[in-house]
Every structure is written in C-alpha cells, then in structure tokens.
Image: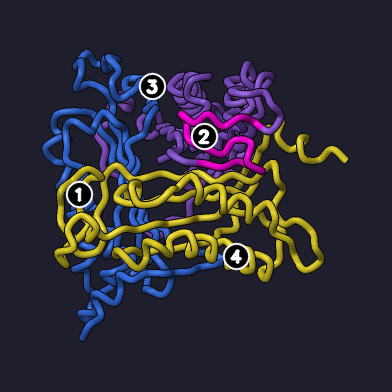
Chain colours: A purple, B blue, C yellow
C-alpha cells in the first residue's frame, strides 16, 4: 500500500541516477522496522515511481525552461546554475503510530539527502520530502506480488 | 470535476493498451448512475490521465530499472519477470454519499481488474485503486466542455 | 514549500507554451502579497511542474487517444476537435488564512485562464484549478535555494 512518488525538474536527469534513488528508497522501506522489530511496509506493496517534469519554473526564473533548454542560472553558473527541485511524497495507509510515520519519513529523507549530496554542493537545488497518511474513501488492491513474500 | 490519474511502471507499456484502459474507465464514469438513476459524474468533467514512470523500483528489486532496462525478475522469468505496478486514483468532489462513492470505486476497480486480467496470469503485478474525496481550499473551473452535454 | 503541479492532455502541447505558463504562474506566486504587503510564498520554495499525460480519455470519447493519435473530435473539427483538459493543483503549507489562500487561488486561476484564452475560443477545453492545504504527517526540506533570496 505505501507508494512514494518523486516529481522533479528534468535538469537533474543528466546529473544523477534516479533509478538508483528509487531503489535505495524502496530498500529502506522494505527494511524499515518499528521499535518492536516488525516490518512497517509490506515488501510486495512497496513501490517508488519517479517523474521528470516536461516543463517547469522554479523560484524567480533561474531555472525556467525545458530540460534541453539553454537558459542560464541567474548567478551566471551557466549550465549548472539552473535551479533544481525534487519533491518526494510518500502516501501511507492508516494504522501506524505518528512516531513510526515520522521515523520512516526521517529515514527516507536521509536516503534522499545522501543521494543528492554530491549535487548539493555543485548546484542550486531544493529537496522536499513529505509523508501523507491517506484518507481514501475507497481502497482496493489486486495483486499477485504479496504472496511472493508471504510464503512461510 | 472528477479526475482519475493513473501512475504505473513503464514495463507495462508494451503489454497493455493504456489508452483503452483510460477510455474504458471514462466510459464507466460517464455511465455511472446512483440508485435514483441520476448520473454521478458530469460528462464534460470526466477525464482520465495516465503516466508511465521514467524510473521506478517495486518491492525487493525484481523490477528495478528503466523501461528499456534489461533487468531480470528475481524469479528468473526474464523479461516478463519484472514486477509491475499500477496506481489508480480518482479524486471526486464532495457531496455524494459514501455509498455512492464506494459503489463508483468498486465499478471502476472492476474495469481496471478486467483490463489487466490477461496480464495478471503472466506476470507479477499489483493494482491499487483509491478514491479521494477532495478537501480543496479553493476550486475553480473554466470550461467549454460542459455546455456540449447540457443541451436539453 | 508551495508547489504547483499541472497535469494536462498532450494534445495541448503543440498549441500552447506550457513552459511560459509555468513561468507566469511562478512569477505570480513570487509576487503575491497579503493585505499587509507581506510575501505569501517564499521565493526559494516556489516551483511549478507540468506533465502531459502519455494516455488519456476526456468526457465521452471526443478526445480519447494518444498525443500523436488521429482520433477526430465528435464535432468533426478534426485535429483541433479533440477535447483538452488541464488540471492545476497548488499544494500549500498550513498557516495562511483562508482569505489569503482563496485570493492566491483566484490570482493563479486568472493567470491560467488568461494563458489559455487564445485556445479557449478555438477548441474544447476544460481548466480546473484547485488549492490543497497540505496535512502532511512528516515534512522535511533540504535546500540551498532559500539563502539566495534571504540575503538582507
């Protein structure tokens, strides 16, 4: 049931391996335990999806433009001066304690921060990570993934 | 006002016709009636948008990789072994009864399940369908679609 | 913290400059003031991301099809007859008054309406703008953008 969606500016595509970030986040979710040592996220229900925007604008215009655009950052850093932005949103089901939700958020945010550390020193970038606990009025799952991981 | 957004792993692109799924879901929404026989969704406000992810990770890594990747599933099924995932989210306006919301959700979930049935037996896939009733603080519509369907 | 995500049918891609819309919306956000003249949105936290759908269906089928499809609108307008749809969603942090949220929504909706005015007379299109005030259970920011705009 947990899914993590990443929306980001396409100017990051060439600078970082987003598939690796997806994998690192999923691994952290799969391995995340509460204080009692129980898995917080079911393995078969863990998924991370990442989407570069086709068009974007960040802040005052330093990064406006398309992925392939030639727009220069306002600070004259040129290609690397384009503002970048990553939004990570984890939607969880209800039923975990607030402490567990916040601990999971902190663990995943740390993964994202570590992933972007090499970029963070080189370009202007904002990374926001938020966790929503879903309040869906209807919820349905149809999956043959869960049985793969519940075989004992 | 109702819109349905589909987020999915790109490894499904070659195996299924997502435009056909969008159409089937929209048709079901357009034709959906409450117990009194009234249309639940306005025709001119019905829309379905589908987005394959550029990068993704599902579960423990069987499906990590890009759409064009050569990653094999953990179970050795090869190309078809990649884990797949589809998330369908319908956002509705307020004002319907909970029973109508749930009935609409069940009808649409059945459409999705039927659409993916031929795939479900062949590969590992999870399908989640959720309905959110929006709690927007501001809401504005500007459309010339509605008049096309309100001509009586 | 505010981010605005635009989801739209790909049949609009050739008719309008979505990067310009992103920029216009970001500029309006950056310049937006409350009654006391205070900036409502931090410059460094303002971002707009736009995503054309890969597959879609709108209303009763006039616009079903892919971006490159040859589907004709039900009214026989041909290429331009395809129904189009744009969904703009602004997610804001908590703490602003409802009046400020609604005023910001109205200002941004007006920008979108103005942007699409040349198209509105020529094709069938629906534009929906909604503002959500986030209720995230976890929230984390890691950014080197804000300092650029807080130098005094």
Residue bounds of the magenta highlight: A56-73
The spot of residue B50 in percent (x, y) is 30, 45
Secondary structure found at label 4: helix
A85 left or right of C143 in image: left
Q: Circle 4 is placed at which residue position?
A: C107
Check the residue under mark 3 and report the chain it is in.
Answer: B
The spot of residue B109 in percent (x, y) is 25, 53
CA separation in Å, label 4 and label 2: 24 Å
CA separation in Å, label 2 and label 1: 27 Å
Dot 4 or dot 1: first in sequence order is 1
Question: Which image quadrant is residue C121 in?
Answer: bottom left
Secondary structure found at label 3: loop
Pick the front one: B97 or C104: C104
Residue name at image x 39 percent, y 59 percent: B91
Residue B60's label in the rendered image is: 3
Would you say residue A90 sits in the magenta stretch? no
Q: Circle 1 is placed at which residue position?
A: C65
Secondary structure found at label 1: loop
Residue at mark 2 shares a chain with residue at mark 3: no
* Label 3 packing within 10 angstroms: few (<14), some (14-19), many (20+): many
The answer, for residue B40, to whether it is visible in the render is: yes
Check the residue under mark 4 and report the chain it is in.
Answer: C
Number of the front mark, 3 or 4: 4
B101 left or right of A91 in image: left
């Amino acid at each position: 049931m947990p899914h993590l969606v990443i929306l980001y500016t396409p100017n990051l595509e060439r600078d970082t391996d987003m598939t690796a970030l997806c994998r690192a986040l999923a691994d952290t979710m799969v391995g995340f335990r509460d204080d009692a040592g129980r898995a917080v996220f079911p393995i078969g229900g863990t998924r991370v999806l990442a989407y570069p925007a086709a068009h974007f604008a960040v802040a005052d215009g330093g990064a406006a433009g398309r992925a392939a655009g030639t727009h220069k950052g306002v600070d004259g850093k040129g290609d690397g001066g384009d503002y970048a932005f990553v939004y990570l949103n984890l939607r969880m089901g209800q039923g975990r304690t607030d402490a567990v939700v916040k601990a999971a958020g902190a663990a995943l945010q740390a993964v994202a921060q570590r992933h972007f550390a090499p970029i963070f020193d080189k370009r202007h970038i904002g990374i926001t990570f938020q966790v929503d606990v879903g309040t869906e009025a209807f919820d349905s799952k149809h999956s043959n993934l869960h049985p793969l991981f519940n075989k004992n």
